[in-house]
Image (tube, rainbow, N blue to C red):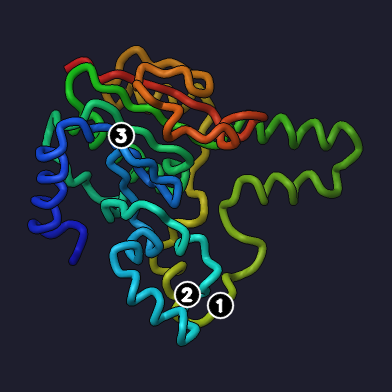
Amino acid sequence: MHPQSDTYKMSAEKVVSSNPNLDRVNLGCGPFAPPGWLNVDGSWNGWFTHHKHLRRALELVGVINASNQGADWQVSPLVHYLSKPLPFPDNSVSAIYASHVLEHLYRNQAMALLSECKRVLKPGGVLRLVVPDLHALVVEYLNSKNNGSSKSAADNLNEKLAFRPPAPRAGNGFVRFYHLWMDFHSHKWMYDSESLSSYLEGAGFHQVAQMELHKSAIPGIEEVEQPHRILDGAGICLEGKKIA
């Protein structure tokens, strides 16, 4: 089923309307998809959680790797590509969380997603974003240069920016085609606190502020937020509120 089909959208709306307490959305959840949240992911690993027998068959014939973390998912997410409009009605969810997701979209796609988040949030709803901290990466690069590690500083920065891997993707033709077709695993645009704040405000969010780990207007944020994605310069976290 194509994620943007009318049937799919109706299914997504039914999930929200039939679960009034399940209105906190976790976008790009990955394998960390806690119950109590409406977990959304567009990866093939997310799709395979709904088709486990097919995944097993492809593993047996060697098309995909059996050791891939996708086999460990405990929750089957709502499958949706975040480059497309969100399949939820207007004013239908109270909170949206997205950790290390926005940088995987082209900037115009990311801005469209912010607008979509505002559309589907209820008045008073909160959007919380975690992204890699461009400022911290640049400071680390400059410190390495100043400390005499200039030979490796550029390589380390490139690896952490993650715009492209150092070599083409390995694997069989199916896997390489998937990565080329989806082009989601590399980073497309990076943010610091100031730039992300300006984009949130430009999308119509209010009371935009940088937040600490597990400090949030969203109840139960510790259920979904992983410390290693924020602490020690790994990421920055910002929240914005939809007023109307």
Contact between marks 1 and 3 (CB within 8 A): the answer is: no
Image quadrant where residue 239 sits: top left
Q: Can residue 37 be seen from the camera position used here?
A: yes
Amino acid found under the numbered disc labelled 1: Gly
Residue drawn 47% across the image and 59% down it: 72
- Residue 171, label in figure: 1
Mark positioned earlier in the residue sequence (3 or 2)? 3
Residue 85 screen position, x and y as percent: 21, 46
Residue drawn 60% across the image and 70% down it: 168
Q: Quadrant of the C terminus?
A: top left
Task: Classify mark 2: residues with Cα within 10 Å, few (<14), some (14-19) or many (20+).
Answer: some
Q: Nearer the viewer, residue 9 or 39?
A: 39
Contact between marks 1 and 2 (CB within 8 A): the answer is: yes
Question: Which residue in the rendered view is the most extreme toward the top?
Answer: 207
What residue is disc 3 on? 114
CA separation in Å, label 1 and label 2: 6 Å
Amino acid found under the numbered disc labelled 3: Leu
Could you tell me which secondary element the residue under label 3 belongs to?
helix
Residue drawn 53% across the image and 23% down it: 213
Q: Quadrant of the N terminus?
A: bottom left
CA separation in Å, label 3 and label 2: 30 Å
Could you tell me which secondary element the residue under label 2 belongs to?
helix
Q: How many marks?
A: 3
Q: Nearer the viewer, residue 150 or 98?
A: 98
- Residue 37, label in figure: none
Nearer to us: label 1 or label 3: 1
What residue is disc 2 on? 175
Q: Can residue 119 be seen from the camera position used here?
A: no
CA separation in Å, label 1 and label 3: 34 Å
Nearer to us: label 3 or label 2: 2
